[in-house]
């Protein structure tokens, strides 16, 4: 199947008893058994497996070209499960520009259990060999990163650690499988905050993992079952419904994101634009080779360098909504310093370039004329 067909039919089956085209929402905690230990249809208890969640998980595996999909109660619950593959004393090499919640999970929770984390720039993959240690067991990547839209060459990183018993895990939330498929580039695990583009309508909190191999899928499923961070059946249905329109929505997100970035690049009040689809972006060629489009996430700073200008802008927007999160059909604007990345220490933010005047936009699917007019008006102070 091609991708646009996969999002609708990939891994899916009509409900066998009624022929229902859509998977029903199985609101049940447990399932009747024919005799002790003999299951009727392979389902025993919904923490282990639920038909609605299974339909979503099969869809996730299909669209990411993986073996096993798993759905969790949030993106952070999914990351939590990945880290539980490791043992005390193991080392994780992570990209330095991370979502604040991921950084918090790594540094304030799992570091207490003797996991070691190193955060570095992945701009020059060839130099990363010096960051690997004898106890390195995982490389954690975001690409594009949050919020500075930096790219990581997934194929090169995967080749760098090949044969070293090091897992490559990729947060593919910003790109989605419509634009980028990390498993095809050599990664072992893909993670999504399915709250974002996969769900697509800002009405669900969910996380997803896709494992490349059966063995890795089984290991992650055991952690999901044993730890219990599962996605409920109704939320599973909402994400599955969102996936069916993923390709259609992403086309408009990409189209609008490109035009917003080009508009901001020419605006006299704007300094830096962080968007991989601009030819002026130093990673533009990597973006073209690794992604089939550039997405709807755009970040920018002001020439004044003043936080007050970012605040004025964010208080003036009308079509864009000042809110955390991203990837919904509606356009959102966010101030990373005080919102999504507030958990990262101020000195670390400054070191990374997450300045107080940085604004991150999630460009939605509205008419582009209305979005550009809103930006022009909000920047007219």
Image (cartoon, helix red, strand yellow):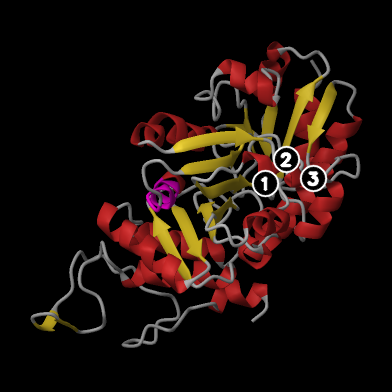
When the figure is inspected, residue 223 is found, relative to residue 321, above or below; the finding is below
Which quadrant is the C terminus positioned in?
top right
* Residue at the outermost front position: 134
* Tag 1–tag 3 contact (CB < 8 Å): no
- Residue 319 in sight: no
**82 inside magenta stretch:** yes
When the figure is inspected, residue 324 is found, relative to residue 368, above or below; the finding is above
Q: Secondary structure at mark 1?
A: loop
* Mark in front: 2 vs 1: 2
Residue at 50% in and 36% down:
117
Disc 2 or 1, which lies upstream in sequence? 2
Q: Which residue is mark 3?
A: 276
Q: CA distance from mark 2 to mark 1?
A: 21 Å
Residue in the foreground of this view, choosing between 57 and 232: 57
Q: Secondary structure at mark 3?
A: loop
Q: Is residue 269 left or right of residue 27?
A: right
Q: Which residue is mark 1?
A: 364
Please state the total of marks drawn on the protein image: 3
Residue at 41% in and 64% down:
237
Residue in the foreground of this view, choosing between 294 and 219: 219
* Mark in front: 1 vs 3: 3
Q: CA distance from mark 1 to mark 3?
A: 17 Å
Instruction: Estimate how packed mark 2 is, as few (under 14), some (14 to 19) or many (20 or more) residues with alpha carbons within 10 Å.
Output: many
Disc 1 or 3, which lies upstream in sequence? 3
Q: Which residues are magenta?
A: 77-85
Q: Which residue is mark 2?
A: 150
């Amino acid at each position: 199947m091609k991708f646009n067909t996969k999002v609708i039919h990939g891994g899916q089956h009509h409900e066998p008893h009624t022929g229902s085209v859509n998977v029903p929402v199985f609101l049940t905690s447990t399932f009747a058994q024919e005799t002790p230990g003999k299951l009727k249809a392979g389902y025993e208890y919904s923490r282990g497996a639920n038909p609605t969640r299974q339909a979503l998980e099969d869809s996730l595996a299909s669209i990411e070209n993986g073996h096993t999909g798993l759905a969790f109660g949030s993106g952070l619950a999914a990351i939590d499960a990945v880290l539980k593959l490791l043992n005390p004393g193991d080392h994780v090499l992570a990209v330095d520009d991370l979502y604040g919640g991921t950084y918090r999970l790594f540094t304030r929770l799992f570091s207490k259990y003797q996991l070691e984390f190193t955060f570095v720039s992945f701009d020059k993959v060839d130099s990363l060999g010096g960051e690997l240690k004898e106890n390195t067991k995982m490389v954690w990547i975001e690409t594009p990163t949050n919020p500075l839209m930096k790219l990581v060459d997934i194929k090169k990183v995967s080749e760098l650690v090949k044969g070293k018993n090091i897992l490559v895990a990729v947060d593919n939330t910003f790109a989605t499988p419509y634009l980028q498929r990390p498993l095809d580039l050599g990664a072992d695990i893909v993670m999504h905050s399915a709250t974002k583009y996969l769900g697509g309508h800002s009405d669900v909190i969910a996380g997803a993992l896709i494992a490349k191999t059966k063995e890795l899928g089984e290991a992650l499923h055991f952690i999901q079952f044993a730890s219990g961070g599962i996605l409920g059946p109704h939320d599973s249905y909402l994400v599955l419904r969102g996936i069916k329109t993923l390709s259609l929505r992403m086309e408009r997100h990409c189209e609008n994101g490109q035009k917003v970035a080009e508009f901001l690049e020419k605006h006299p009040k704007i300094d830096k634009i962080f968007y991989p689809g601009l030819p002026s972006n130093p990673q533009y060629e990597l973006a073209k080779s690794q992604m089939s489009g550039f997405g709807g996430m755009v970040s920018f700073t002001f020439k004044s360098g003043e936080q007050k200008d970012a605040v004025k802008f964010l208080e003036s927007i009308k079509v864009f909504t000042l809110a955390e999160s991203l990837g919904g059909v509606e356009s959102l604007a966010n101030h990373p310093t005080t919102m999504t990345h507030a958990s990262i220490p101020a000195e670390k933010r400054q070191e990374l370039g997450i300045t107080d005047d940085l604004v991150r936009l999630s460009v939605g699917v509205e008419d582009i004329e209305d979005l550009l007019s809103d930006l022009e008006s909000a920047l007219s102070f």
